[in-house]
Amino acid sequence: MGKIVKPKIFLIGESKVNIDGLNELMHHLGAPDWKSDAPSDIELLCEVFGRACYKSFGTNLNPNVTRVRKTSKSYLTNIIEKGDGSILEHGVANFFISDVSRAFTHELVRHRVGTAISQESLRFVRLTDLNWYAPVSIQESPEAMTIFTKTMEDLSRIQKELATLFELDEQPDFAVKKEITSAMRRIAPIGLATNIGWSCNMRILRNVIEQRTAPWAEEEIRLVFGEIGRIAVERWPNLFADYRVEIQDGLPVYITDNRKV
């Protein structure tokens, strides 16, 4: 039978700099000696695209520029404080989020701008044992846990009974398997644990972390984006240095004074 699971977050990819191309660009722009102390490729990309807007790689490229911010952190901090968030869209991170409910994914896909989403298909993936996430309110009630556990066990059993009824293990035609599997998913619960791939740019990532770690957000999505927030601050410190973390209801809330980025 299925089991209780907790969400797991994997950062499986992120934007990378083509060093040869960047060096060629710097020569083309007249700043061959420009260097950045950006701690990540994503932050370097955001910095390059931003500085290119004003030719602020130095004071000799634009006569209107008499001084420049010399560090990546000071430059990106100023960008964020001014709200010039468009340059943050050049950096993209690829997350794989596992063992989350369909309730979670239904909320996540509302954030469409600046994202790419690939979700496990229950039209193709046949269900057997149904894993599930237990919210704290359910965990704190032995009676509720008994009801939830029994329900998931019953639904797991029904999935297997239907598979046996339609002899899916012996069915050679994948089109038939897909048709029956699609039909069977209609009695799968919204609390079913599933997987989803979610890619986003840094601008939308900031926005979603703020919205989905807020105290009024749903518990499971707060749990996920609390962890994603931790990853973001650790991985891209110059882009997330303005966040402070408060704990409410046992979960982190990511707060910034620069909300309109």
Image: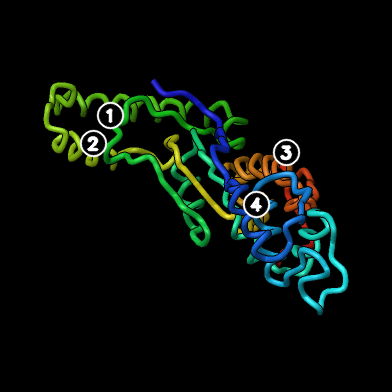
Determine contact: label 1, label 4, CB under 8 Å: no
The answer for how far apart the CA atoms under marks 4 and 3 are is 16 Å
Q: Is residue 39 left or right of residue 153?
A: right
Foreground residue, 110 or 130? 110
Residue 227, position as x, y percentages in the image: 65, 39
Earlier residue among tags 1 and 4 = 1
Residue 149, position as x, y percentages in the image: 45, 26
Q: Nearer the viewer, mark 1 or mark 4?
A: 4
Circle 1: residue type:
Gln
Circle 3: residue type:
Gly
The answer for how far apart the CA atoms under marks 2 and 3 are is 39 Å
- Identified at 50% across, 47% down, the residue is 198
- In the picture, the disc for residue 181 is 2
Foreground residue, 124 or 27? 27
Q: Secondary structure at mark 4?
A: helix
Write down the residue under mark 4: 209
- Identified at 73% across, 38% down, the residue is 250
Residue 191, position as x, y percentages in the image: 45, 39
Write down the residue under mark 1: 159
Earlier residue among tags 4 and 3 = 4
The answer for how far apart the CA atoms under marks 2 and 1 are is 9 Å
- In the picture, the disc for residue 250 is 3
Circle 4: residue type:
Ile
Earlier residue among tags 2 and 1 = 1
Q: Nearer the viewer, mark 2 or mark 3?
A: 2
Q: Secondary structure at mark 2?
A: helix
